[in-house]
Each structure stands twice: as C-alpha cells, then as structure tokens.
Amino acid sequence: MRFLSILALIFVSEADASYLDFGIPPSNATVDIRVFNVVNATLVNQLHASIIEPVLPGREAITFPFLAFLVEHKVSQKRLMFDLGVRSDPLNFAPNIAALFTDGIIQVESPGRDIIELLQDGGIALSSISAVIWSHAHFDHIGDISKFPNTTGLVIGSETDTDTYPQFPDASLVESDFAGREVTKLNFAAANLSFSGLKAIDYFGDGSFYLLNTPGHLPGHLSALARVTPTSFVSLGGDTFHHAGEARPRPDFQKMYPCPAHLLEETKSSISTSYFWSPKSRDGAFDLRSRAQQLLAISDLPDSFTADAVQAQVSLEKLATFDSDEDFFVVVSHDISLRESIPYFPASLSGWKTDKLKERVVWNFVNKANPAFLFSPINETQSLQE
C-alpha cells in the first residue's frame, strides 16, 4: 500500500508540476516561510550605482527593505533563520561598515529594532532557532548573531571570508559574529544535486529545503529553495539580484506572466526611451513586450558591491529560470517592489500560489507609483505628470 501511495504521488506530481523539469525530486515534506521586514534604508550619493545600473538623473537615492526569513520544518518543527537583516546598533559593526552609517550614506528609517526583537515580540523563542543561515556576509544580512544563544548554529558558504576585526583591520566582520558558536561551512563541491545549473544541498535530507550555490555577489553567496507545498516553492535569492528590473522582463517570463494591460499602456510613456529601448519602441513610446533583455544590470563599477559581476550575472540567469516558472516565487532580500504587498509575519508566504500572489506583484516594479520605479529621470517623470 505504501508503495502504491508513493507511485500515486509521483504520478500526480509528474502530471501537474513543472518543477520536475528542473530535476527537483518529488516529496511531500515541506517548510513554512514567514517574512520580516527588519528595516528600510535609503542609499544616497549614488551608492546604488555600486549595485545596479543605470542610475538616471534624479534617481540617485533609492530605498531598500532589509528582509529576514523564518523557516520552519513541518515534520521536525525545527526553525531556521535565513538572513537576519541589519543590526539595530550599526555603529558596532566593524569600522569600515559603521562609517557608511556615520557618514549618512546609508540612512536607516526608524532605527532601534532588529530581528531579535521582532522574533521575541512575535512569540518566537530565540532558543528555538536551531541555525542561522547567512546568504552571505554583507552587513545587511548578518544582523547581530551574538544575541542568539550558543546553541544556535551558523551556516555559511565555504568561500565566506571569516576574518574579523580587530585582528584584521580591514575586515567587515567582528569577533562576536563567530565566538562560541558552531559554524558550518557548506561544501557545494561535494553536492550531488543540481537544479538549473545550481549546485544544491538538501538541508533536512527530505527535499523540503535546499541551499543553492549562487556565487558572484560575494564569495560564499548562497540562496535557498523552500518547498512550501509538495509542488510549489519559494526561492530565497539573497542578493542574487537587488531589483526586479535586473531579472525582468525576459521572453520566457513575459510568456508566462504577461504585463497587465493598464501597466503595459502606462509604460509606453513612463519608461524613458532616452535610456531604455526595444525593437518595437519609438522615440517617446517604449514597447515593453518586445524587450527581451532585463531593464537593469548588475553594476560592474570598480567600487561595486558585487565581487565578480560576470559570475553574478550567470547566477542571476540560472535563478531567473525559476522566476519564469509557475511553481516558483522568487523573493530577494531587497525587493522594494514587494514592500506593500508581501505578507509579513505572522502571516505565511507559503500560500503564495493559491493566493495568486505572484501574478499580482511581479510587474509592480514598472508601476510609476511603486517605489521600485527607476525608469525615467525625475524631471522627465514630473513633466509627464504635468
């Protein structure tokens, strides 16, 4: 009887779920994903030119959310954190990071609360978090793990730079990020799974939660793939990209998720043809449907926050195959286009497919009323509205 049940599961999955095309094994094991917006922060002085390109006149400042994710394994009820956002006392970062805050280059909205307080306010005991996973070791993802008990492990990519200040004066991490804690470095070289060209490690061993090797943004950068129902997934992309315009549009995505008619009409005049073009565009009339290339690019400037822009672009291309598939909802850590529409803790993100959330939000970034809109100079936008 059990053998027949497994066959039935496989048959149903193969009939209904395109996720199998990626080589992801079928499973009934799932996790629950809940999202915290730890804080919103504005990058000024064209700092975001070190993240995404192009930066149009009047768009020199941009606001990003710093997201953190609570992962709960349904069977064992083990809890993980995927990223922690930024700490509430940024002046206690290593000096080279603290300077970004003291110099006003990064301006945090309403500082003072971090993921620790948000978890405790939500009734989540810190002792119940078995491990924290850093997508990478940038300051806006590592929080202050020293506030977790030593029973909470830390999981990082194998190439993560673990040098700490003050022993290494230029280090971005501090001693308390590792002190007294079990640290696990993932060995993707030994991984025997690969989805869309991304090496994968089955964290719980039951197909419910995979960690993916997505190098480029920073050595050791990783992403996660969470099975939230037997046939649907949330892809936690970390900083594989920062803005939806780095991943969209592209032909497969537009075929699966056509831009809503009202936004499509709006983009004809709202997206500047002085900076963006497509085969069927005309001066002053942008044509989104014929645009095959994503609108924004990963910055390759010398002072870029991305360590290897070419490698990062390859990782983005691989992750974007999930974005174009109906079984996956991709959420990156700083997607401002989702700020007003994504369900936050205590609500769950796991029902995204039933709720048709993806269809409702994936084109938010081209809505000129959305804070993610970056596709015309401010003065041009103003003249269009006048």
Image (cartoon, rainbow, N blue to C red):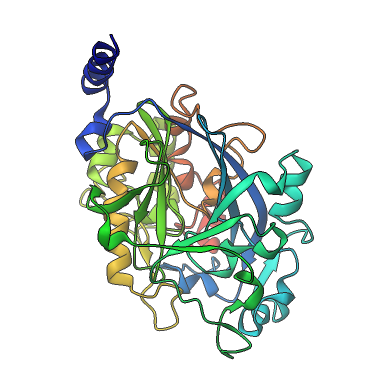
The N terminus lies in quadrant? top left
Residue 180 found in image quarter: bottom right
Residue 254 is situated, as x and y percent measured from the top left of the image, at 29, 38
Picture residue at 24% right of the left edge, 49% below the top = 194
Give 377 or 140, whichever is nearer the viewer.
Answer: 140
Picture residue at 72% right of the left edge, 76% below the top = 92
Residue 105 relative to residue 2: left or right = right
Residue 373 is situated, as x and y percent measured from the top left of the image, at 50, 52
Please say if 279 is above or below 159. above
Residue 382 is situated, as x and y percent measured from the top left of the image, at 57, 56
Picture residue at 71% right of the left edge, 71% below the top = 90
Q: Does the image show residue 46?
A: yes
Give 256 or 197, whichever is nearer the viewer.
Answer: 197
Q: Does the image show residue 286?
A: no
Please say if 349 is above or below 224. above
Give 131 or 292, whichever is nearer the viewer.
Answer: 131
Picture residue at 24% right of the left edge, 21% below the top = 10
Residue 71 is situated, as x and y percent measured from the top left of the image, at 54, 41
Residue 255 relative to residue 347: left or right = left
Residue 263 relative to residue 93: left or right = left
Give 229 or 358, whichever is nearer the viewer.
Answer: 229
